[in-house]
Amino acid sequence: MENQKSNSSLKAIIIVLALLLLGSLGYMYKMSTDNQTSENKLMSDKEKLSEELQASIAKYDEAISENTSLSDELAAEREKLVQLKAELDKSKGDVAAMAKFKNDYLRLKREMDNLIKENDVLKKQNVVLTTQRDSTQVVLEDTRKVRDTLIASNDNLSKTVERGSKLSVLNLQTTAVKQRSSGKQIDTDKASRADVLKISFMIAENQIAKSGDKTYYVQVIDAKNNVLGDKKTEIFGDKTLTYSFTKTVKYENKTVKVEQDLPVKDIEGGSYFVNIFDKGELVSKTSFTLR
């Protein structure tokens, strides 16, 4: 009888322990499932918040591209969102951290909404100003065209006057002579007899040219490409000129004849070239031949 009671008590204890074990296993399973669900939700919230941050950053990019006076402030606030997203992506996403990230984002989003609204107002104002500016620009463009036409006309007139005021050098001639002891000069075409080259040219009348002293550079080149005479060199801008002599003429807007003798010695037969320069510009040329 006592054995039967003992067995019954033992069975009851075993049943109770089994129930407790099953309850513990059920509780552990539920806790595990709840933790997994909570973790999944946190990950989902993290991804969603990250996407919202990226969308807000994109809004800032669009607003900044509109180039209003708020561009610097927009860029500064955008940088705050970029930093917040970077911190969120690095975090493990626990409950406390996610709560802080959400609060920070909501605060920054309120600031963003205010700035975006203000930027939209400025953008509309810019549209109005741009329309007004374009209208003004049309008027200014028309004025500029008239001005450019007048400038072009003045330039053409100035160039015409400049071309017309240039002096013409005409009838450039060179004669080789033999100088007698008596002073008499005898023309010759033999190089061995020549000891003077007589050079002459005319400056034509020009009433619109500037009067005063005019200096010409005369260059005489022999058959061997040597410059005769002084062989001095002058630089005019990017041009270098070696010349035989200079001749200064007092010009009074009337035709004037210019003459100059160039002494020579032991010259040889061949072709000779004579060039007249007004500074660096060639204004007349001729050639002659000696036997």
Image: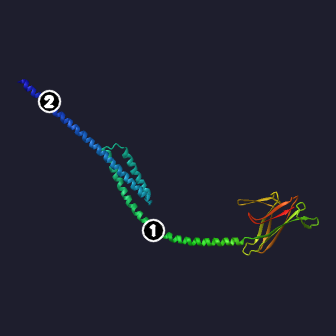
Whether residue 223 sits left or right of residue 21 in the image: it is right
Q: Residues within 10 Å of mark 1 (few under 14, many from 20)?
A: few
Q: Amino acid at mark 2?
A: Ile
Element class at badge 1: helix
Determine the image quadrant of residue 265. Answer: bottom right
Q: Amino acid at mark 1?
A: Thr
Residue at 20% x, 37% y is 26
Q: Quadrant of the C terminus?
A: bottom right
How many numbered tags mark residues here? 2
Residue carrying label 2: 14
Above or below residue 95? Residue 238 is below
Name the outermost residue toward the left.
1
Q: Residue at x 65, y 73 (%)?
A: 157
Say which quarter of the image contains residue 257. bottom right
Find the distance from the CA under tag 1 to the CA under tag 2: 92 Å
* Residue 196 location (% of width, % of height): 87, 63
Q: Which residue is at 53% across, 72% downward?
A: 142
In the picture of the structure, the residue carrying the numbered disc 1 is 131
In the rendered view of the protein, which quadrant contains the N terminus?
top left
Residue 79 at what x, y percent from top left? 41, 51
